[in-house]
Amino acid sequence: QKGHCDAPPTKAPPVVPMRSFLRRIRGGGDQPASEESEASEFPNLVGMTGEEATQAILQVDSSLTGNVHVLPEDCMVTMDFRTDRVRIFVNSNGRVARQPVRG
């Protein structure tokens, strides 16, 4: 009796880099985009505290209230893409480590 582990291997779907995937669903096609252009919705927040960055994001889009999350930069998160959410990754000093974007 064969178990499911004995099944012949199936061909895995092609791997699409996350940046390319995000460009496609945002309507940018396959044109290259810089980190700065992807993050242009919000002002430069790197180096601010998580709370300062949260307030700056909410000034730009108050509809994000309750959906701006401050997390440690090495935190594992789900990979689902949500335009109503912004994650702010902070370093051990509580400072923004990389530019926040929707998703």
Image (tube, rainbow, N blue to C red):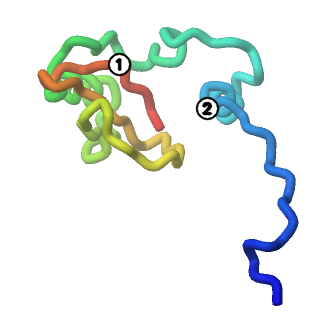
69 in relation to 3, above or below: above
Closest to the observer, 15 or 41: 15
- State the mark number for residue 61: none
Question: Horizontally, is 91 left or right of 22 in the view?
Answer: left
Labels 1 and 2: the sequence-earlier one = 2
State the CA–CA distance, disc 1 to disc 2: 16 Å
Going 30% across and 30% down the picture, which residue do you hit?
Answer: 73
At label 1, which amino acid type do we have?
Arg
Badge 2 is on which residue? 18
Going 14% across and 28% down the picture, which residue do you hit?
Answer: 51
Image location (x, y in percent) of residue 87? 34, 35
44 in relation to 76, above or below: above
Going 61% across and 26% down the picture, which residue do you hit?
Answer: 19
Q: Label 2: how many residues lie within 10 Å, few (<14), some (14-19) or many (20+)?
A: few
Question: Horizontally, is 23 left or right of 99 in the view?
Answer: right
Image location (x, y in percent) of residue 9? 84, 60
56 in relation to 76, above or below: above
Badge 1 is on which residue? 98
Image quadrant where residue 45 sits: top left
Question: Horizontally, is 85 left or right of 17 in the view?
Answer: left
Going 32% across and 40% down the picture, which residue do you hit?
Answer: 75
29 in relation to 6, above or below: above
Image quadrant where residue 59 sits: top left
At label 2, which amino acid type do we have?
Met
Q: Residue furthest front?
A: 1
Is disc 2 placed on a helix, strand or loop?
helix
Q: Label 1: how many residues lie within 10 Å, few (<14), some (14-19) or many (20+)?
A: some
Is disc 1 placed on a helix, strand or loop?
loop
